[in-house]
Image (cartoon, rainbow, N blue to C red):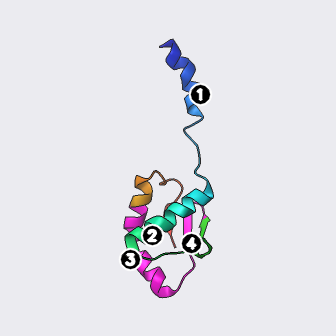
Amino acid sequence: FTMLKTLSPFLEKFKNLKVPKDALLDDIIIIISDKTGIKLEKENISLNKPIVFIKADPTIKSEIFFKKQEILQELERRFYSKSVIDIR
């Protein structure tokens, strides 16, 4: 029990770790590609936490928005639910 008390403050530091922006963008691109077959480049995506903005042709954006819930669910499954809550 004493050891647990001493570890607790140490482990608290890891609760609120943030994912590096580049890693998050890479994962978003991969997930969008997996769910839609659309391969975006980093310059087509911007992240203004917690919202992802897609810069693309309206047809491409429509396909992404059609699969938006699946994409967001996958992000949540990968523990990004606090980092991304919407795609626009």
Real-space Cα separation, disc 1 to disc 3, in angstroms: 43 Å
Residue 71 at what x, y percent from top left?
A: 41, 65
Residue, x 46% and y 50% (percent of image)?
79
Residue 65 at what x, y percent from top left?
A: 43, 76
Residue, x 58% and y 43% (percent of image)?
17
Residue stretch in magenta: 48-73
In the image, residue 87 sits, relative to residue 19, either above or below, namely below
Which numbered marker is on residue 10?
1
Q: Which residue is disc 4 drawn over?
A: 53
Callout 3 crowding tier (Cα within 10 Å): few <14, some 14–19, many ≥20: few
Real-space Cα separation, disc 2 to disc 4, in angstroms: 13 Å
Which residue type does callout 1 highlight? Phe
Real-space Cα separation, disc 2 to disc 1, in angstroms: 36 Å
Asked whether the residues under the numbered discs 3 and 4 touch, taking CB atoms below 8 Å apart as contact, a structural biologist would say: no
Real-space Cα separation, disc 4 to disc 1, in angstroms: 36 Å
Which residue type does callout 3 highlight? Phe
Residue 14 at what x, y percent from top left?
A: 57, 37
- Select label 2 or label 4 by which is in front: 2
